[in-house]
Amino acid sequence: MKNIALADEHSSFERPHFDVEAVRRQFPVLARRVHGRPLAYLDNGASAQRPEAVIDAVDDYERHHHANVHRGVHTLSQEATALYEGARDRLVQFINARSRHEVIFVRGTTEAINLVAQSYARPILKAGDEILITYLEHHANIVPWQLVCEQTGATLVVAPMDSRGEVHLDAVESLMSSRTRLFACAHVSNALGTVLPVRRLMAAARARGIVSLIDGAQAVPHMSVDMQDLDCDFYAFSGHKMFGPTGIGALYGREALLERMPPWQGGGDMILAVSFAGTTYNTLPYKFEAGTPNISGAIGLGAAVEFLAGLNRVAAHAHESALLDHATRALSGIPKLRIVGTAGDKASLISFVVAGVHPHDLGTILDGDGIAIRTGHHCAMPVMEFFDLAATARASFAFYNTFEEVDRLAAAIERARKIFT
Ligand code: PMP
């Protein structure tokens, strides 16, 4: 309750009510202490914590239902299959895909993007073709395209960002041409927090007949995403950033494109019939799910989706925005601190540097106070290069974070600054 009172002091009274303490109680790890201090977990951009609903769903599966999926006539196999496919159905609804053929379970965002690069792009690319991305991408949305460009002779083209970390529609549009075979961009930058104008970017791609992919790893935890509204061709995201397990994520793909794409990996489950004369591939989505999948992970992800769907996401988003505003104000008041990434539209993530204090030292001192932040290049080395930095410190907030935690963060940074400068 204290947090809510604080929240009301700090921002608009029109913000919908959000009971942070009630939400926190559903995340067991948030009750623990680190180095004798209450944990302030501000590293959600790297991986978010799991609610009891997810832990319980995985536990129930492991204790009572585990068997391999799809192939068994026995009870446990049928139960495991129903749970696994039920999780897919939840995801389909959650992202408003048109059909369950469009949602493929993968290891995470990284694997989803590699799948598209190798299965969609590689067969169609030739020398002279271009893949267009933006400057602020995570390495997972850079390197798979570099690889496929090396394999095919195509060229990787990078749309610029400005000094606030914004990517502008006109700058991207001016690089879209008849040579552009695919446009890929982040929905939200993990290094800067920038929310990209994806609807307008997708419309620009579509108007030119360019196939599009969105890296939604940092968006899905913070906002509702609707595939039919976004009108992208591919959308990739990771379970562990949206309060689900690691090693599981999903690729949304437009059915007509997925139908045309060859399988990425071959093996069991992705076939209907195999003989030495040739193989008939399975139907969607199984064509892209070779081998025994991460069954418990998918079930946990289904539970995470159900948890998120049961949350008042408008209120959760408003709470996160208020946390970001509060953090921006608090950190701006610290001498020698510079916020890196000042876009007009940001998710609840704040990257910063303090002159004279190495981000890793800062991270270590904050850990001593029980405060978990991330320091480093955030797998976005071009972004670091752009700002002429080797690393930043990054606090990334989820809806379970509190204003008190933000105040602790600011106070600890100030203490660290005084030690070093
Ligand atoms: N894209 C973005 C924007 C990310 O933040 C991350 C994870 N940091 C990834 C892609 C890669 O996600 P994963 O490691 O779960 O595959």
Image (spheres, helix red, strand yellow):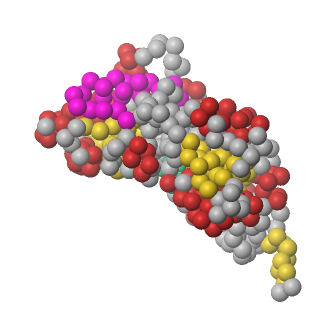
Q: Residue at x 71, y 35 (%)?
A: 204
Name which residue lies at 35% across and 32% down. Answer: 339
Q: Is residue 341 visible?
A: yes
Please say if 74 is above or below 388: below
Residue 335 magenta? yes
Residue at x 57% of width, y 60% of height: 146
The image position of residue 407, as x and y in percent, is 29, 29
**Location of residue 393 (image quadrant):** top left
Residue extending farthest to the bottom is 276
Q: Is residue 245 above or below residue 204?
A: below
Q: Relative to 299, is 24 on the left or the right?
A: left
Q: Which residues are magenta?
A: 316-340
Q: Is residue 209 left or right of residue 112?
A: right
- The N terminus lies in which quarter of the figure? top left
Residue found 83% across the figure and 52% down from its top = 256
Residue 310 versus residue 115: which sits nearer the camera? 115
Query: Residue 81, located in which quarter of the rendered image?
Result: bottom right
Residue 78 visible from this viewpoint: no
* Camera-side residue of 24 and 96: 96
Task: Please identify the quadrant where the C terminus is shown.
Answer: top left
Instruction: Please state the horizontal and vertical placement of residue 343, each as a whole percent of the image.
Output: 47, 29
- Whether residue 322 is in magenta: the answer is yes
Which SS does the magenta portion mostly show?
helix
